[in-house]
Amino acid sequence: MRSTAGPIRLVIVGATGMVGGYALRYALGHHSVERVTSIGRKNLGVSHPKLKEVLHRDFADCSALAEALSAQDGAVFCLGAYTGAVSDAELRTITVDYPIEFARVLHASSPGAAFSFLSGKGADPTGRSRMPFARYKGEAEKALLAAGFPRVYIFRPAYIYPVEPRKEPNFSYRLLRAIYPGFRLLFPNQVIRADDLARAMVDVVVQKTAERESRVFENRDIRAMIR
């Protein structure tokens, strides 16, 4: 049996990004969330009575976050990078090393916390994919599922529609945004709005349950959650 009984203390990593930004706004307005701790490398420029902001420059070592991560009920991890925007070595560091290191410190400080992780469509925990992004996301998923958290939720969205205008990271994203209305009608399970994805990632953490569970949500599953 699930409930949304509060108060909930929630950590959001990557709130300056698209999905993380929506997760932050949704969490701050959620009646069951008592405190939101945002951890990132840049100032948010947001003021809210529920919000505690922690600046942390080097996610390769999260030891300094131990105090900030204590007594937390859950975390929503949205920190990431686009393929092609950084070198392959840096992509692996951000995609694999950062969430694993953060999870290590979070589990030591709040062993009962739930963990919600932004992965991606095609993530391959077997490591056999020819696509680096898929291998790296799969490697991170595998490590997080084995990290000891009582509840782990892996989200594998396909194309994430930005909702608000932004500078797209590459041509593929510019094209997808341009054809989004028709693409959404033809392939509804290949798209998800950024705000809907963020809401789903927060909701699974906020919902309290005594059960231990690990779940992987593909794009179709995420759409079903927000309907």
Image (spheres, helix red, strand yellow):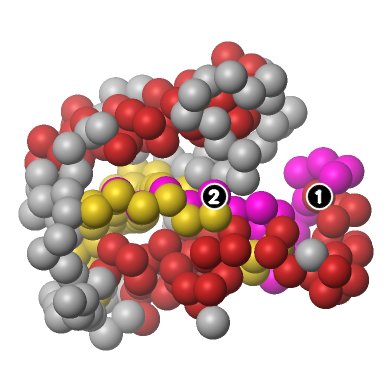
Q: Report if residue 188 lies within the magenta region.
A: no
Q: Which residue is mark 2?
A: 156
Residue drawn at x 69%, y 20% as measured from the top left: 130
Judged left or right of residue 29, residue 121 is right
Tell me residue 192's x, y (percent).
65, 65
Residue drawn at x 30%, y 49% as measured from the top left: 214
Q: Choose the circle earlier in sequence order: 1 or 2.
A: 2
Magenta segment range? 152-172
Residue drawn at x 29%, y 63% as measured from the top left: 205
Tags 1 and 2 touching, CB below 8 Å: no
Please name the amino acid that badge 2 sits on.
Answer: Arg
Q: Which residue is mark 1?
A: 173
Name the residue furthest top: 89
Q: Quadrant of the N terminus?
A: bottom left
Judged left or right of residue 220, residue 178 is right
Please name the amino acid that badge 1 sits on.
Answer: Tyr
Q: Quadrant of the C terminus?
A: bottom right
Tell me residue 7's x, y (percent).
14, 75
Tell me residue 121's x, y (percent).
61, 45
Circle 1 — which element? helix
Q: Quadrant of residue 106?
A: top left
Q: Report if residue 163 lies within the magenta region.
A: yes
